[in-house]
Image (cartoon, helix red, strand yellow):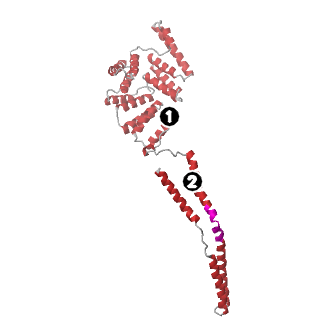
Amino acid sequence: MTLWFVFALMTAAAIFAVLWPLGRRIRPQGGGNEATVYKDQLIEIDRDLAAGLMGASEAQAARVEISRRLLAAADDNLRDRPFASNIGLRRAVAVIALIGLPIMAIALYLPLGSPRLGDFPLAQRTPKPDATQPLENLVAQVEAHLEKNPADGRGWSVLAPVLARLGRYDDAARAYRNAITYGGDNAARRADLGEALTGAAGGVITAEAKAEFERAIALNADEVKASYFLGLAAEQDGRTAEASSIWRAMLAKAPGDAPWRPLVQAALARVDGSAVPALSDDAVAAAKDMNEADRGAMISRMVDRLATRLKQNGDDVEGWLRLVRAYMVMGDRDKARGALADARQAVANDAERLRQLNEGLKQLGLDG
C-alpha cells in the first residue's frame, strides 16, 4: 500500500511540474512601450535636424535604423498576442495529456496486468525449465547451462540418468564422469558410469565398464548395481559358476522386500538352466508333453517366427523383449545382441517405446 502511495505522489508531482509552466499567463513583452520609444526617437531626430545638431545624411541613416527597430517591435507584438490568447486551450491540452494518459494506462493494465501478484524473492526469479516442454527440449536447456557452467557437479548428476533413459549412453557416460570430477567420487556414481558404458556397448560389459564396477565395489562392498553387473560380466564370459556365486551372495544379504530381488532371482535361474523362453502360454502348453529334442525344435521354430514378425513390425516392444530373452536362454548370445541392436534401431524415434525397451532389458539383466 505504501508503494502505491509513493507512486501516486510521484505522478502528481510530475503532472504539477508540467502543468505549472503551461498554465502560467504570459505577460506582454512590452512591445507597445518599445514602439513608443522608437516614435519619440524619430521626433527627436527631426528636432535635432531642424536645430542643426546633425546633418541630413546622418538624420536619414538614423531614421532608417529606428524605423527597422520599430517594425521589428510591431511584429513581435503581433506574434505574442495569439499565443497569449490561447491559454485556455493550452491548459485543456495539458490536462488531457497528463491526466488522460495515466487513466488510459491504468485501464489497460488492470485487465492485462497482474496488480495483485506478490513479490518474488530473488532466489525464485531465476528461470526454471517449463515442465510441459518435451523432455528433449529440457535436456537441451540443461546441456546449454552446463556448457556455460562445466563445474556444476549437481547439474551433471541430474543430467546423466536422463541421458541414459533416452538411450544416449555415450553422453550419459561423459556426464557421469563430469559428475564424479566435479561432484565427488562414490560407489553409486561409479556403478552408474559402468552401466552407461555397458549400454553404449549394446549390453556387453566391456573391460572399461567392468573396471568401473570393480571401483564401485572397492568404495562400497554392498553396492547392489555393481555386484549385479559383475555377475553379469562373469556370465557373459562363460563363468556361470562365478556369476551364480555373486548373485547368491547378493540374495543371501538382501532383505526380503528388496525391489531388485526378482531381477537377481531371474538372472540366477537363467545361469542355473531353469528358465525357459518367455513365449506364449499356448507354446508352453504345447511343449509340455514333448521330449527335450522336439521341445527345443519347436521353441526354435517359434523364435524364428517371432524374429520374422518383428522385422515386419518393429514397434512391438514386448515381442523384442521375448525374442532377446529366448536367445539368451537358448545360449545364442550373438543373436541376442543382434536382436537387442535391431530392437533399439526399430524404436529409436519413439522415446516412450525406447524407455519401455530399456526397462525391459534391464529386467532381463542386460542394460537400462
Could you tell me which residue is drawn at 62 percent across and 65 percent down?
A: 87
Please name the residue shown 37% across and 32% down the image: 189
In the figure, 95 relative to 289: above or below? below
x and y percentages locating residue 293 in the rendered image: 46, 8
What is the three-letter code of the residue carrying label 2? Answer: Pro
Work out whether residue 57 or residue 41 is closer to the camera in this orientation and state it: 41
Kindly state the secondary structure of the residue where label 1 is placed.
helix
Q: Is residue 118 visible?
A: yes
| Residue type marked 1 | Leu
Q: As rendered, which of 341 and 46 lies closer to the eye?
A: 46
The quadrant of the picture occupied by the C terminus is top left
Residue at label 1?
Answer: 135
> Would you say residue 74 sits in the magenta stretch?
no
Magenta residues, start to end: 79-91
Q: Secondary structure at mark 2?
A: helix
Q: Kindly identify which numbered label has been placed on residue 102.
A: 2
Please tell me how crowded label 2 is: few (under 14), some (14-19), or many (20+) other residues with Cα within 10 Å: few
Counting from the top left corner in percent of width and height, residue 307 is at 53, 19
